[in-house]
Image (spheres, rainbow, N blue to C red):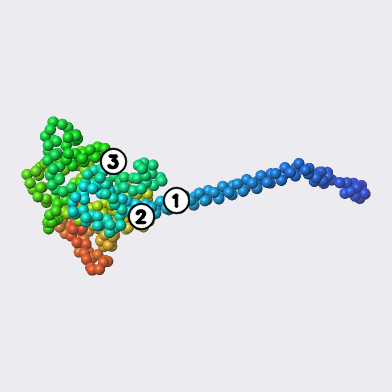
Amino acid sequence: MPAVQRANTWEISDSEEESDLNKPSSSSSGEKKKRRRRTREEVQEEQENRRAAREKQRQEKNKLKEEKLEEQQRRREAAVRVSLFKPENFIKSLTLQIHAALLRDAGCDVLLRTLDGLQWKNCIENQGLPNSISWTRPALQTEDEAKNGVIEEDQVLMVISHYEFEDMVMSHKTETNQPAPIGVVYEEAESLLQHLYKYLTEASRKFVTVLVISHQQRSGSGDEDHFDFHLSQHHLDTEALLVHLQLYWNVSVNFLFGWQEVTDHVVAVTKAVSKRPYKALCGEPDLGFCMDGSWSAGVRVDRDGRGLAQVWTRQIQQLNRVSPALAKAVTSVYPSPSLLLQAYEQQPSEEERRRLLADLTVVGGAKERRVGPELSGRIHRLLTSQNPHLMLD
């Protein structure tokens, strides 16, 4: 029985095993078949594929390089444009067009000397609105609405004497007494008022400001409206003309004393005109009273209440004429509105509630100062008033 079991364990002999090892496997023969030599067409096809891949890579690299150069060129052009639009550079391109009729007044020399001292370009013209001062500049490449390569600014000043203004008043009175609608231009009239109407009709986008000159000295009160002709019998007619110009033609009238004030006004308008393109380029917000920086970004308040003290300080700063030091003086003593309301309730009278914060010391500045009764009363009205239309000042 044991012999039979041992015989069963040797079913494969050594000779058979050696013969199996000497036989080549099918996998090795398959590998040899795969290692066959490539044909010339296959080699050429592979070379062409590699060459096409390298060419594609080179084109992509050149495209990226061109895009980078174009971006750099755009940035350089934008930088040059921004530099041209800066007020200190843009004002050099402005040219003041002074009407020849203004040279008849000897006081115009003050304006001309000032412009020459500032090295601003100006020229004498005999066209357009009589007695006017306007501004022109060369057109940029991006501006298509240029006429003969020149851009005319929309601001125009009309400088007249108070005698000429009186003539305009009488001309307006004559027109209004005739049976015709208000604003009609009469062809037979030759006054400056008619020239002004004609100019505004042809140039609807212009904003004209009339500067009336009085050669008297300014009074001590500084009121610009105290001219002799205002105190004359034509006072109501003058007011009627001012209202008519403002409502129907959007023309404002300024009364100045002498050519020095006219010169100061011209200089101020010139600087304002030079600042407009740069502000428009920088995208200045329409709400000019919004502050920049952290104020406009708000205050972050965490879940644990961190930041509420700063919100309380900013809330007081929203009042007119309240500095950060004044607001800090209040919030350091009363860290929250509820604590301040509790302090108000503890006061026996309304007067003491209004003066509760008056004696608080403001830290900072050259000398020590107090919050004062005026601000104390405004804060009291802010927190206790039930009238939503109440003026805090």
Q: Which residue is drawn at 72% across and 42% down?
A: 45
* Res. 285 visible in picture: no
Residue 123 position within the rendered picture, expressed as x and y whole percent measured from the top left = 28, 50
Q: Residue at x 12, y 40 (%)?
A: 170
Please indicate whether residue 87 sits to the left or right of residue 100 in the image: right
Label 1, label 3: how far apart the Cα atoms are: 30 Å
Please indicate whether residue 211 sits to the left or right of residue 35 in the image: left
User: For mark 1, does the 10 Å Cα neighbourhood hold few (<14), some (14 to 19), or many (20 or more) residues?
Assistant: few
Identify whether 58 is placed above or below 366. Answer: above
Tell me the SS state at disc 3: loop
Whether label 2 touches label 3, CB < 8 Å:
no
Between 176 and 166, the one nearer to me in the picture: 166
Between 126 and 225, the one nearer to me in the picture: 126
User: For mark 3, does the 10 Å Cα neighbourhood hold few (<14), some (14 to 19), or many (20 or more) residues?
Assistant: few
Please indicate whether residue 217 sits to the left or right of residue 130 in the image: left
Residue 33 position within the rendered picture, expressed as x and y whole percent measured from the top left = 81, 43
Instruction: Report which quarter residue 318 is drawn in.
Output: bottom left
Residue beneath disc 3: 205
The amino acid type of the residue labelled 2 equals: Asn
Residue 157 position within the rendered picture, expressed as x and y whole percent measured from the top left = 23, 47
Q: Which residue is drawn at 7% across and 46% down?
A: 232
Residue beneath disc 2: 89
Identify whether 63 is placed above or below 217. Answer: above
* Res. 142 visible in picture: yes
Q: Name the residue furthest top.
A: 179
The amino acid type of the residue labelled 3 equals: Arg
The amino acid type of the residue labelled 1 equals: Glu
Between 185 and 49, the one nearer to me in the picture: 185
Whether label 2 touches label 1, CB < 8 Å:
no
Label drawn at residue 77: 1
Tell me the SS state at disc 1: helix
Tell me the SS state at disc 2: helix
